[in-house]
Image: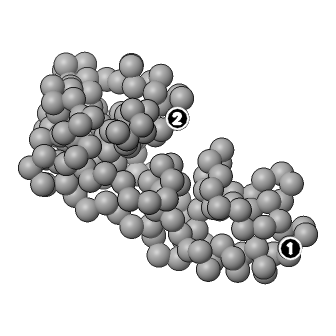
Amino acid sequence: MGRLADEGACFETAGFLPTPRSRHNERLRLSLPDLAPVAARLAGLANPVNRPLWADLETRTEAAHARRALAGEWPPIPDPAPGELALVCRPNLDVYSGLAGLYRTRHGNLRTDGVAAVLGRALTEGRQRDDALWFGPGALPAPDELAARYGDPAGLGVHMGPESVRYLWLDRADRAGRG
């Protein structure tokens, strides 16, 4: 058996998810002026994989993400990992595609339908994209459209990754009725 290795500390700002807690925390999001004075120190304490997140912190603001989206420089939206399913088994043994607290397609009940049938249905459906789990099936607005309509072009809140700010914009769109 392999040994566990301590890769060191990992420091990031919280990623946004479309939940009441994230909406509350968004009002408290650390901004560039908050983080710039301590970024070099955090980078020095962070593990080597996490260290680059603290360089060029201004490129991680909502405004910088919006500029990239509007310029057509948004990174590809990741596909689900091949062979990976996000399933939730409820206490009554109902199995859903989704995440804890976020149930989408019901595949059946392990007790009444049997494990093979339930998992077979889940495998047939396959892995949904995480954004489909959060925002439902169907086409979602492209990052450039989201940035134009729901991004803050002067926003200094720091989002370490593009999915965090994209989820923020999708949440704003959903709350505005995607209209």
Residue 91 seen in this snapshot:
yes
- Above or below, comparing residue 117 to residue 25 in the picture: below
- Residue at mark 1: 113
Question: Percent x, y for residue 17?
Answer: 46, 40
Q: Quadrant of residue 153?
A: top left
Quarter of the picture holding the N terminus: bottom right
Q: Quadrant of residue 179?
A: top left
* Spatial CA span between label 2 and label 1: 32 Å
Closest to the observer, 42 or 19:
19
At a point 42% along the width and 37% down the height, the residue shown is 177
In the rendered view, does 86 fall on the left or right side of 40? right
Mark 2 vs 1: CB contact within 8 A: no
The mark that comes first in sequence, 2 or 1, is 2
Closest to the observer, 114 or 42:
114
Q: Quadrant of residue 89?
A: bottom right
User: Is disc 1 surrounded by few (<14), some (14 to 19) or many (20+) residues within 10 Å?
Assistant: few
* Outermost front residue: 179
In the rendered view, does 39 fall on the left or right side of 172? left
Closest to the observer, 30 or 121:
121
At a point 59% along the width and 74% down the height, the residue shown is 125
Question: Mark 2 belongs to which amino acid?
Answer: Thr
- Above or below, comparing residue 82 to residue 47 in the picture: below
- Residue at mark 2: 19
Question: Percent x, y for residue 55?
Answer: 16, 40
Q: Secondary structure at mark 2?
A: loop
